[in-house]
Image (spheres, rainbow, N blue to C red):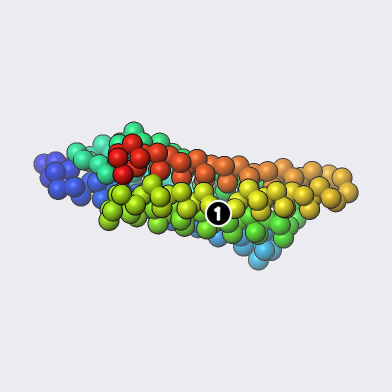
Amino acid sequence: MRRLARGISGAARDDLVDGLVGQLRATEEACDVALRLARGSLAPAAAREEVAAVEHQGDAWRAHVVGSLTRALTSYLDREDLFTYSRAIDDVLDNLRDFVREVDLYRVRPAPGWVSVLEEIRAGVRALRAATGWLRRDVGRVSVASLAAKKAPVRTRYQEAMARLLAEPLTSETLRRREVLRRLDIVGLRLSEAADHLATAAIKRGT
């Protein structure tokens, strides 16, 4: 009866938004860990431990989203679309985790070029969190707000960092740094896909 009451009242629908926002907060925390690593203020092994803990938080929020989808009788957007959006956010977090893990695994020295890429990724995550928040207040603003996440020039900063890297002599260190830098490009692509999922879901709803 309690689950039914929450579904009828719309509380489960709001629980769903809380879960999505929680996922994005965890993703932003992972960005912060990666930035501290890139700036040299956090050792790779310590960063790997921290990002693993953040990933567990993100997984818990994703489970919260899935549970809320089963309880909610109504939803701000299509349930399947919101499930896909939640999975897309999880992909962003997973690739940030992989970035930190690979820096430690490949024994790569932090590079200044990573910072600008990660700062734009964090800006995009924050924009996506703001767009998700509009689900509760004004669904009509979601589609436009979500596209702000795509405006963060992650790919441009990545290309600039890659150009500087490729200008260096080819060594095993350079190759390892290239692989790690490519992981950040993947993070940016997954972020763009998440923004597209949310925008498309809102447009399908006629907003």
Residue 166, horizontal then vertical, whole percent = 81, 47
Q: Quadrant of residue 115?
A: bottom right
In the image, taking residue 121 as reference, residue 132 lies left or right, namely: left
Q: Residue furthest top?
A: 80
Q: Amino acid at mark 1?
A: Ala
Q: How many marks?
A: 1
Q: Determine the residue positioned at 40% across, 57% down.
A: 130
Q: Residue furthest right?
A: 169
Q: Determine the residue positioned at 65% across, 51% down.
A: 156
Classify 10 Å Cα crowding around label 1: few (below 14), some (14-19), many (20 and above).
many
In-front residue for pair 15/188: 188
Residue 158, horizontal then vertical, whole percent = 67, 50
**Split into 4 quadrants, where in the image is the C terminus?**
top left
Q: Determine the residue positioned at 74% across, 45% down.
A: 178
In the image, taking residue 164 as reference, residue 159 lies left or right, namely: left
In the image, taking residue 71 as reference, residue 175 lies left or right, namely: right
Reading the image, the residue beneath label 1 is 152
Residue 43, horizontal then vertical, whole percent = 67, 60
In-front residue for pair 159/106: 159
Q: Quadrant of residue 35?
A: bottom right
Is residue 10 visible to the viewer in this orientation of the structure? yes
**Split into 4 quadrants, where in the image is the N terminus?**
top left
Give the answer, above or below, for where 174 lies relative to 83: below
In-front residue for pair 201/68: 201
Residue 196, horizontal then vertical, whole percent = 46, 41
Q: Determine the residue positioned at 52% across, 44% down.
A: 192
Is residue 48 visible to the viewer in this orientation of the structure? no
In terms of secondary structure, where does tag 1 sit?
loop
